[in-house]
Amino acid sequence: MAGKKVVGVLALQGAFREHIKALEMLGIQSKLIKNNKDLEGIDGIILPGGESTSMGKMLMDFNMLGILADKITNGLPAWGTCAGMILLAKKINGDDNAHLKVMDIDVERNAYGRQIDSFVTNKIIPKISSTELPLVFIRAPYINNVGIGVEVLCKIDGNVVAAKEENMLATSFHPELTEDLTFHRYFIDMIYS
């Protein structure tokens, strides 16, 4: 990999520390993103799991929403996990207020129920790995519909739970809450490609 890349992790709320730890384990330089100034000098951004409504409101309150959306639209690699997937989506089912509106997906918020309905499953995702990966779902969304340019990477019980569109990756599940670094490596490869 030529040149050292810096991956930003949105740090307004949610599981940002776990993503930072995963990046450190891969030897990737990371940066906490808390304001517009922090968005400068990054080569990719991870939008973590957490509360999408809270994160969306903070992005708006801190005047980051439009600037971040423009950066992603102009090619900044972005990966949204769980709530981060909701932030990326152009449409949220039953809600007229989508956030960044950059990825051509329609998501169903809390599609898998409440916290008590959380689960872990293992699945081979051929585009990502030839071995089973642990997939952690916590009050997770899934994708109802994808646009023409969106590649479906994984389905669970017929529901789309991982997808890619150009420079954007979205997962319903939380790779950062496992010891497996496969998805983080995949995103780093997206940044370097």
Image: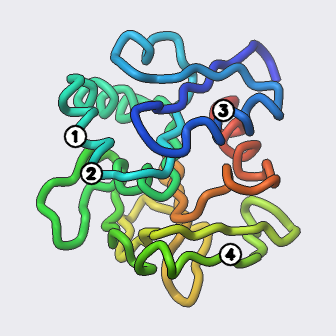
Residue at the bottom extreme of this rendering: 157
What residue sits right under mark 4 in the picture? 120
Q: Mark 1 packing: few (<14 Cα in 10 Å), some, or many (20+)? A: few
Instruction: Please say if the residues under marks 2 and 1 sit with CB atoms less than 8 Å apart.
Output: yes
Q: CA distance from mark 3 to mark 1?
A: 23 Å
What residue sits right under mark 1 in the picture? 57
Q: In the rendered structure, which disc, 4 or 1, sits on the residue that comes first in sequence?
A: 1
Residue 60 found in image quarter: top left
Look at 36% across and 76% down and name the residue there: 144
Q: In the rendered structure, which disc, 3 or 4, sits on the residue that comes first in sequence?
A: 3
Q: Which mark is residue 46?
A: none
Residue at the left extreme of this rendering: 96
The image shows residue 139 at horizontal and vertical percentages of 45, 70
Q: Which amino acid, mark 2?
A: Thr
Q: In the rendered structure, which disc, 3 or 2, sits on the residue that comes first in sequence?
A: 3
Look at 81% across and 62% down and name the residue there: 129
Look at 31% across and 67% down and name the residue there: 106
Between 78 and 149, the one lying in front of the other is: 78
User: Considering the numbered disc 3 on the image, is that residue within a helix, a strand or a loop?
Assistant: helix
Look at 74% across and 59% down and name the residue there: 128
Q: Which amino acid, mark 4?
A: Val
What residue sits right under mark 3 in the picture? 20
Q: CA distance from mark 3 to mark 2?
A: 22 Å
The image shows residue 142 at horizontal and vertical percentages of 44, 72
What residue sits right under mark 2 in the picture? 53
Residue at the front extreme of this rendering: 116
Between 193 and 37, the one lying in front of the other is: 37
Is 113 drawn above or below residue 75 in the view shown?
A: below
